[in-house]
Image (tube, grey):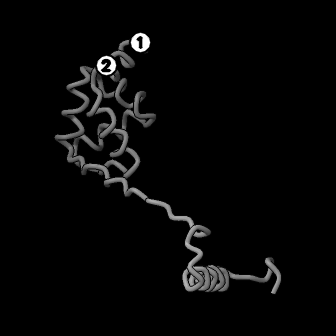
């Protein structure tokens, strides 16, 4: 079977078979391992929590929207509880919350 014709299942079976054979032969130095760290999910942001982050930055909704790269209307919808911030927006809100001083300087430079 050529590489072009292999599907993911075939590749997994082949890799596991090779690993099994190496383990049986005691050739563990030819195997590699990786430690994968899982990143915790972002915090859930309620309307009050979004407004709290913005208030701590001491910026208007328009400036906050610019910092986040979203529209002012979207920030208003978050703060009114009409919409929920996306996973990515929550991740950025986490980053901002952890380093308010840097983000305040960033907001003041704009």
Q: Earlier in the sequence, mark 2 or mark 1?
A: 2
Residue 104, numbered label: 2
Pointer 2 local density, CA inside 10 Å: few below 14, some 14–19, many at least 20 = some
Left or right of 34 on screen, residue 95:
left
Above or below, 18 relative to 62: below
Outermost residue to the front: 26
| Residue drawn at the location 35% of the way across and 15% of the way down | 105
In percent of width and height, residue 61 lies at 31, 28
| Residue drawn at the location 20% of the way across and 47% of the way down | 46
Above or below, 95 relative to 34: above
Q: 75 or 35, which lies in front?
A: 35
Residue 40, image quadrant: bottom left
| Residue drawn at the location 37% of the way across and 52% of the way down | 87
Left or right of 43 on screen, residue 14:
right
Q: 71 or 67, which lies in front?
A: 67
Residue 73, image quadrant: top left
Above or below, 80 relative to 52: below
Say which element carries label 1. helix
In percent of width and height, residue 89 lies at 37, 44
Task: Quote the CA–CA distance across marks 2 and 1.
Answer: 9 Å
Indicate the quadrant containing the C terminus: top left, top right, bottom left or bottom right: top left
Say which element carries label 2. helix
Above or below, 99 relative to 95: above
Left or right of 66 on screen, residue 102:
left
| Residue drawn at the location 26% of the way across and 23% of the way down | 57
Q: 60 or 53, which lies in front?
A: 53
Indicate the quadrant containing the N terminus: top left, top right, bottom left or bottom right: bottom right
In percent of width and height, residue 92 lies at 37, 39
Q: Report the residue marked by disc 1.
A: 109
In percent of width and height, residue 53 lies at 23, 32
Pointer 1 local density, CA inside 10 Å: few below 14, some 14–19, many at least 20 = few
């Amino acid at each position: 079977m050529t590489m072009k014709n292999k599907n993911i299942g075939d590749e997994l079976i082949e890799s596991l078979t090779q690993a099994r054979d190496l383990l049986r032969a005691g050739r563990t130095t030819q195997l590699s391992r990786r430690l994968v760290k899982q990143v915790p999910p972002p915090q859930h942001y309620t309307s009050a929590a979004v407004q709290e982050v913005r208030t701590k930055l001491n910026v208007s909704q328009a400036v906050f929207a610019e910092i986040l790269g979203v529209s002012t209307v979207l920030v208003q919808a978050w703060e009114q509880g009409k919409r929920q911030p996306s996973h990515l927006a929550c991740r950025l809100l986490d980053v901002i919350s952890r380093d308010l001083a840097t983000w305040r300087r960033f907001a003041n430079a704009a």
